[in-house]
Amino acid sequence: MVDSGVTEAVLRAKLIEQLGATHVEIEDMSGGCGQAFSAIIVSSQFEKKTTLARHRLVNSALKAEVAAIHAWTPKCYTPEQWEQQRQSGTQAVAPGKDTTGEVVTGTTA
């Protein structure tokens, strides 16, 4: 088993520090070896940014960590978007917790 040294706690702490994230859910999808993570990240820094710009911001903040792991799947929300989901009862879950059959670019189904 390969251990990347990247943990849920390391990712969470860095996202809070670098992006001022107000809510972070990280799930290790690799069975504990730290090679694949999915995440929900809520930050006001995502305001007025496209999904791609949000992902670039996150990947920039986690540059060393993303380079050390095999797979990283973030879902990024503004505090307002997150609150709307909470109120409507349609809160997202970390991508690995609820599969929709969606195929991520660069992978095979």
Image (spheres, helix red, strand yellow):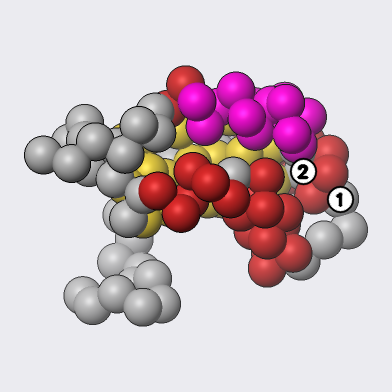
Q: Which residues are magenta?
A: 10-23
Say left or right for 104 vs 85.
left
Residue name at image x 40 percent, y 33 percent: 6
Assess disc 2: are there few (<14), some (14-19) or many (≥20) residues with their C-alpha within 10 Å of its C-alpha: many
Residue name at image x 62 percent, y 39 percent: 41
Rendering quarter of residue 26: top left
Rendering quarter of residue 94: top left
Q: In the image as oriented, which residue stretches furthest toward the right?
A: 48
Residue name at image x 46 percent, y 54 percent: 67
Q: Dominant secondary structure of the magenta stretch?
A: helix
The kind of residue on which mark 1 rests is Glu
Number of on-image labels: 2
Assess disc 1: are there few (<14), some (14-19) or many (≥20) residues with their C-alpha within 10 Å of its C-alpha: few
Say left or right for 31 vs 107.
left
Q: Position of residue 61 (x, y in %)?
A: 67, 45
Name the residue beneath numbered marker 1: 47
Q: Position of residue 56 (x, y in %)?
A: 68, 61
Which label's residue is closer to the chain start, 1 or 2? 1
Say left or right for 39 vs 51.
left
Residue 58 lies in the magenta-colored region: no
Rendering quarter of residue 97: top left
Residue 41 visible (yes or no): yes
